[in-house]
Image (cartoon, grey):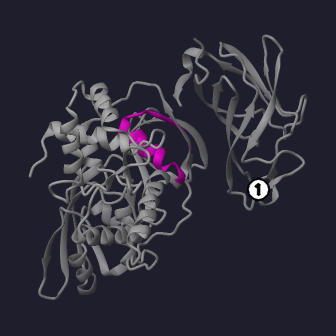
Amino acid sequence: MAISRSAYRRYRVIDSLLRNTMRKYPTLLDIQEACENKLDISPSLDTLEKDIRNMKLPEPDGFDAPIVYCRMNKGYHYTNPKFSINSISLNETDISSIKEAMELLQNISGDRVGDRFSYSINKILTSFKETFPDGNSKRKIIQTDYVPGARGFENFDLLFRACKNKYPISFVHYSYNKREFKSVIVHPIMLKEFENKWYLVGYSESHDGLRTFGFDRIYQPLFLKKRFIASNQDEVYTYMNDLYGVYPIENQPKQSIVIKTTPIITNYFEAYPIHSSQVSEKQSSGNGIFKFELVPTVELIRLFRSYGVELRVLEPMWLDHLVKNNKP
Amino acid sequence: MKNSNLSKVFHFNLEGHSRTNPKLVRIQLHQEYTKVDFGYTTSEIYYRGGWIKIASGSFLEVIATGKRYQLQLAENIPIAPIQHHFESKKDWRYYSLYYLPIPMQDCSINIVEVENGTLNDFNYYDIQLRMENGMEVLE
């Protein structure tokens, strides 16, 4: 039996009165008065009595509400003070799915997510333990490549909010290469994780273009009350989709990159494509020819170098020289 | 009505009165404090990068009125005589000093660790603060 909208509104009023610990044991007259105040209607006492009966019905017709009339206090109350019709009821499948999801979340997140999110997860985990005593959330089944204690990660929440709400930010940046501090204004676009390191991507006023800033080099970001400068959408798209890694080589557009790999390395590239544009062709010898459409990055060069003589860049030639020269 | 949370931040890239001084990178004016942010990079001059500290008597001075605003809190740098010793000639440190609040109006200030000090003291002179250059901070 479906519950009508008007009945559901009355149920919510009844529920709120029964959960009000400051004024316990409401009577039907109290409920009627509350309906008048909150809903601008005055249901009959018969209707309210029927509502209470319906709320007590088992699901799905009612809410299985533990409502009883207390003769001593001459009013209604919940026998379970924690009960509310707003509580979510779960069946065995729901509970099982949540248990699995919670364990997965705890396994893969650890300290990785921000404080506020961790707090929320912990709240859920607390009730999870209470509600599902057989849950074994301590046992780690999935191990991710994450070591806690990364510098700058404490700003995750703030930078996330800046991206989400489009708040320009002021922060002090330290450049490892230049060994130099600089105050910068950035109009943030997104947070990006690559090889277990976190980065902020945004429009930098002083660079007049999109830039990537490692979390570890960002000091004391502040939200600014300033007009947000939206970046060129094509440039943003490139940053989001055409990079392997985070630091593009300056003045290099998206281009075809072709590499040749030995049979062993071919297996890895085939098993773990490094980019969605990757196209492969296997030679009879077992060598692989891989083609990408990418903006060359510092990280791409580092990856290619890591395979030594097992990998050779066929195109473009300048990239081949750069990889061989072993200079940044 | 006065907004007690009004805060403005000014960006700088100012060297001190000697090349081994930290770089002054930001000043934040708040109704309750004035915060100055510095970045220090160690140099080749000192053994293993040397050390830094800040004198407890540091103050900020509004040049026009001569009024001084004392250091209240040092963040990420010890108050003398305690020193932070670096490990190498390639280290760096970001730190902030909180002073009593200065009026939020156009002015020039000095930030002084030691009056008539040596080049090793962290002194900065005649820093221009124009309110139109300050950016309002969202708290």
Residue A238, how many percent across, how many down? 25, 48
Residue at 34 percent of width and 63 percent of height: A300
Q: Nearer the viewer, residue A278 or A9?
A: A9
Residue at 73 percent of width and 37 percent of height: B97
Residue A157, how many percent across, how many down? 46, 48
Q: Magenta part mainly helix, strand or loop?
A: helix
Q: Nearer the viewer, residue A105 or A181?
A: A105
Which residue is situated farthest in the front direction here?
A71
Residue A142, how many percent across, how many down? 38, 77
Quadrant location, the C terminus of chain A: bottom left
Amino acid type assigned to the residue bearing label 1 in the image: Gly
Residue at 25 percent of width and 28 percent of height: A39
Which residue is denoted by mark 1 in the rendering?
B49
- Vertical side of A272 occupied by B99: above or below: above
Q: Nearer the viewer, residue A67 or A316?
A: A67
- Vertical side of A132 occupied by B79: above or below: above
Residue A75 occupies which quadrant of the picture?
top left
Residue at 37 percent of width and 29 percent of height: A228
**Left or right of A197: which side holds A46?**
left
**Chain of residue at mark 1:** B
